[in-house]
Image (cartoon, grey):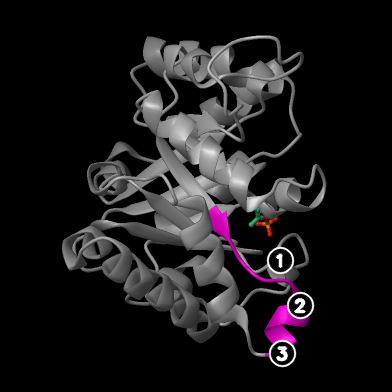
Amino acid sequence: PAGRKLLIAGNWKMNLNHLEAIALVQKIAFTLPEKYYNKVEVAVFPPFTDLRSVQTLVDGDKLSIVYGAQDLSPKDSGAYTGDIAGPMLAKLGCSYVLVGHSERRELPGETDELLARKVEAVYRNGMAPILCVGEGLDVREAGNQISHSVAQLHAALEHVTLEQAATLVLAYEPIWAIGTGRVATPADAQEVCSALRVALAERYTPEIAAGARILYGGSVKSGNVAEIVAQPDVDGALVGGASLDGTEFASLAANA
Ligand code: PEP
C-alpha cells in the first residue's frame, strides 16, 4: 500500500536439499507469469546449502525471483566454526537476510544485543535485513503486543543509521500464529504494523517510515493473503509452511 511494492518472502526454514530447492524455484518460475513481478517482489530464503544452486538458476535463467539467507554471523570472518558470514552471502547474490526470526530468538536464544550486531553485519555487506519482531501468546493475552514489538524494533536497530534505514524491511510475526494455522486477523496485523511504522517515524524520519516495507507473517496462505495485504500498513507477507509448495506459493504471490 501507499506506493510501496509488496514483498512476498518464503522462509523455507530447515527444509529441502539443493535438488529440491532447484525444483521448487523452477516450479515458482513456471507457475507465476512474468507480469506479476511488477506488482510483487518474490523472494525465497533457502537453507545456506541451497543458496549456490538457487543463485545459478536465477542468474542462468534471468529469473525475477530474488533470494536471501535465514541468518548470518555478526562477524565477517574468523575462528567461528560452523558460522556463515555476511561477505559469503553477498558474494552469492543474496539481497536480504532474515534477522531475529522467533525460532532463532527462542531456540538458540539470540538476544537483542546479538541481533543488533547481526543487523549491522547485514548492512556492512550491502544487503538489507528483514527484521522479525512479534509477541508470544502470554504477551498478547496481557494486551502488550505493541510495546513488546516496538521494543524489539528499537533494540535491534540500535546501530542503524538514517541512510541504512532506507532499505530496512520489518516483519511482524506473532509467535502464536507461526506454523499453527491460527492466523492473526487483518485488524490485528494492521494494529501492530502501523505501530511499528510510527516507531520508525519517531526513530528516523516520516519519509523513512513511509518508505519501509512491513510484512506480516504467521500462517499466511494463498486463501488469506489478499485481506492481509489490503491493510494500509501491511506491505507483504513472510511465509513459512506455504512457501514449500511451488504452486501454492506462486498463487499466494499472485493473490497478494
Ligand atoms: C515463518 O516462519 O516466518 C512463518 C510465518 O511460518 P508459517 O507461515 O508456517 O506460519
Q: Name the residue under label 1.
A: 175
Rendered residue at 41%/44% (across/down) = 159
Q: Nearer the viewer, residue 95 or 141?
A: 141
Local secondary structure at mark 1 = helix
Q: Earlier in the sequence, mark 3 or mark 2?
A: 2
Left or right: 21 with respect to 32?
Answer: right
Between the residue at mark 3 and the residue at mark 2, the CA separation in whole angstroms equals: 9 Å
State if disc 2 and disc 3 touch (CB < 8 Å): no
Q: Mark 2 points at which residue?
A: 137
- Above or below 221: residue 84: above
Local secondary structure at mark 2 = helix
- The residue under label 3 is which amino acid type? Ala
Which numbered disc covers residue 142? 3
- The picture quadrant for ligand 1 comes to bottom right
Taking the magenta stretch, the answer to whether it contains residue 139 is yes
Q: Earlier in the sequence, mark 2 or mark 1?
A: 2
Res. 216 visible in picture: no
State if disc 1 and disc 2 touch (CB < 8 Å): yes
Could you tell me which quadrant the C terminus lies in?
A: bottom left
Camera-near label (3 vs 2) is: 3
Q: Is mark 2 within 8 Å of ligand 1?
A: no
- Above or below 173: residue 34: above
Residue 4 figure quarter: bottom left
Taking the magenta stretch, the answer to whether it contains residue 7 is no
Magenta span: 132-142
Q: Does the residue labelled 1 lie within 8 Å of ligand 1?
A: no
Between the residue at mark 3 and the residue at mark 1, the CA separation in whole angstroms equals: 14 Å
